[in-house]
Amino acid sequence: MKELVLLVEDDPDDLELTLAAFAHERFEPKIEVARDGEAALRRLRGAEPKPALVLLDLNIPKLSGLEVLGLLHLEPALSAIPVVVLSSSDDAREKKKAADLGALAFLRKPFGFAEFRAIVQELNAILSRLRTKGRDAR
């Protein structure tokens, strides 16, 4: 079964660019999309399988990315799901808050396709490290 990544993104242009970069880089995991914080939480609390990774924008409707992170941090069944923040923000306070709430990484959302491809390569590396860590824990 393919790994699952939950992409939480509401901006149609950023979503299209991200998915195009995933396809171009032959990103292997299956991608599911949630367009707001409430939809992300419903998905995470509901259907199986749980994602191997959540790629979370901070500026999303209904519940912000930081609010989603805070709620995930409080729920034992969800707190172990790795979250990578992908945001256009470069605010040091948001980065610190995300780290304090358990974000695995905070990546600055790029503006062009080439930069998005680099982000996808970084996400592949993160997933590879998570797989290795999971095997080592067994």
Image: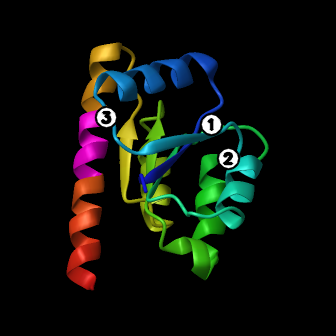
Instruction: Return the residue nearer the eye: 136 or 104.
Output: 136
The residue lying furthest to the bottom in this view is: 138
Amino acid carrying mark 2 in the image:
Ser
Task: Please report whichever mark, 2 or 1, sits nearer to the chain's N-terminal start.
Answer: 1
Residue 25 visible in image: yes
Residue 33: where, in percent of width, then height? 61, 39
Q: Are marks 3 and 2 in contact (CB under 8 Å)?
A: no
Instruction: Return the residue nearer the eye: 94 or 119.
Output: 119
Amino acid carrying mark 3 in the image:
Val
Few, some or many residues within 10 Å of mark 3 (<14, 14–19, 20+): many
Q: In the image, which is nearer the foreground, mark 3 or mark 2?
A: 3
Report which residue position mark 1 lands on.
59
Task: Please report whichever mark, 3 or 1, sits nearer to the chain's N-terminal start.
Answer: 1
Residue 31: where, in percent of width, then height? 50, 40
Few, some or many residues within 10 Å of mark 2 (<14, 14–19, 20+): some
Spatial CA span between label 3 and label 2: 23 Å
> Height in image: 135 above or below 93?
below
Residue shown at 47% from the left, 30% from the top: 88
Report which residue position mark 3 lands on.
120
Task: Please report whichever mark, 3 or 2, sits nearer to the chain's N-terminal start.
Answer: 2
Report which residue position mark 2 lands on.
64
Range of magenta residues: 120-126
Residue 20: where, in percent of width, then height? 42, 20
Q: Is residue 59 magenta?
A: no
Q: Is 118 placed left or right of 72 in the picture? A: left
Query: What secondary structure is found at the residue carrying circle 2?
Result: loop
Instruction: Write down the quadrant of residue 76 in the picture.
Output: bottom right
Q: What secondary structure prevails in the magenta region?
A: helix
Q: Do the residues labelled 2 and 1 touch (CB within 8 Å)?
A: yes
**Render colour scheme:** rainbow
Q: In the image, which is nearer the foreground, mark 3 or mark 1?
A: 3
Residue shown at 47% from the left, 43% from the top: 30
